[in-house]
Amino acid sequence: MSYVFGIDGGGTKTICLLMDENQVVLGRGEAGPSNYQTLGIESAKQSIQLAIEQAVISANINPDSRLNIEAISLGLAGVGRPKDQEIVQFLVQNLQLTPNLPVTRSFGPKNIIISSDSAIALVGGTGHPVGLAVISGTGSIVFGQNRLGKTKRVGGWGYILGDEGSAYNIAIQGLQAALRFYDGRQIYTTLAENFQIHLGLKNLEDLVEVVYRRGWGVKEIAALAPIVDRAATEGDRIAEGIMDSAVAELVLATKTAISGLFNQTEEFEIVLIGGVWGGVGNCQSRFETAISAIAPNAQVIAPRHEPAFGAGLLALNALNN
């Protein structure tokens, strides 16, 4: 029996799955963030080590039967450059696991698979590497691969340069619209009152203290997107416009990816990932309607598995090839 580790290393947490050759998950571990570009190599390595150890511990392996791990796959943000790949390879090869863990390692450089976080999201979401992942969470990106192995990425440029259709983009437009109404530069919107109540503000001017002086970041602002989504479902014209624009941007990004990878009659799956798709509005149904006109044989689905499972599948694929 062959065994692998599949790892999803992000900016907030690291997930590791211990899987066997039959795609059965034996153990799952979770640790802190492992984005080495923001944390440094040593901190990233510690999170990955801890996630691996937690996965092994949760598997309750018989101490007398040590499992041999033959491959490891990691999905990480920002690993597109060869230099990044080298750094992560070095990091993995220098992992120092607790000696009394009932596992051994026998993987060389060829069985250390390093992918983008979008790639493992696609493989985990669909269960295979062919199709599109349309990710709209805190940020947004569309990533796809066709049957010839060609890949295409659209978006993913971060909250300053892009991330159209993301929770952050929706929330920041909502906040700006509320302040424009407060100034008298825009027609009435319930967003002003909704934000004020949600944040417990005396008036909207207190947003300056909340956002700037408290040092709110992307995640804190993105968490306000459901307020815009809810206002849109209640008929607020400004909120409706923001949500319409978000869906249109995600449709455009998906259409661009489709044109670079698939023909109009080809069958493939589009997996929708991220909190925006789970809102109270009808973003998903409007997205599906628009995509059906572009790619009538494409099937829009919810994720079948988590990204770490996709990483595990890539590790197993490396063993088989």
Image (spheres, helix red, strand yellow):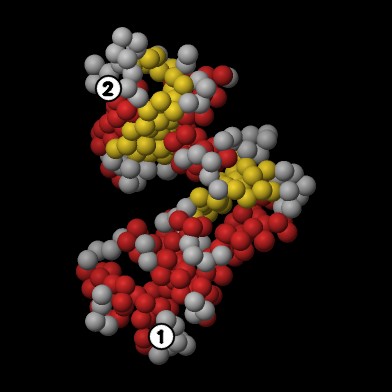
Q: Which mark is residue 305?
A: none
- Cα–Cα span, label 2 and label 1: 56 Å
Nearer to us in this view, 58 or 106: 58
Question: Residue at (62%, 42%) from the top-left corner?
Answer: 131
Q: Residue 203 in the image: x percent, y percent?
A: 27, 83
Residue hosting label 2 = 97
Residue type at numbered disc 1: Phe
Q: Can residue 72 be seen in this view?
A: no
Can you tell which quarter of the image residue 18 is in?
Answer: top left
Q: Do the residues labelled 2 and 1 touch (CB within 8 Å)?
A: no
Residue sticking out furthest to the bottom = 184
Q: In x, y percent, where is residue 77?
A: 42, 43
Residue 288 appears left or right of 314? right
Question: Mark 1: few, some, or many residues within 10 Å (few <14, many ≥20)?
Answer: some
Looking at the rendering, in which quadrant would you find the C terminus? Answer: top right
Above or below, comparing residue 187 to residue 262 in the picture: below
Helix, strand or loop under label 1 = helix
**Quadrant of residue 287 in the image?**
bottom right
Three-letter amino acid code of the residue under disc 2:
Leu
x%, y% of residue 207? 28, 75
- Which residue is labeled 1 in the image? 181
Q: Where is residue 225 in the image (x, y as percent from the top left)?
A: 42, 66
Q: Residue at x 58, y 40 (%)?
A: 126
Label 2 Cα crowd, 10 Å radius (few <14 / some 14-19 / many 20+):
some
Which residue is located at x 29 percent, y 25 percent? Answer: 57
Q: Which of marks 2 and 1 is nearer the N terminus?
A: 2
The residue shown at (64%, 54%) is 256
* Secondary structure category for the residue under label 2: loop
Residue that sits furthest to the top in the current view: 64
- In this rendering, does residue 237 appear at all? yes
Please tell me which residue lies in front, 246 or 194.
194
**In front of the other: 218 or 19:** 19
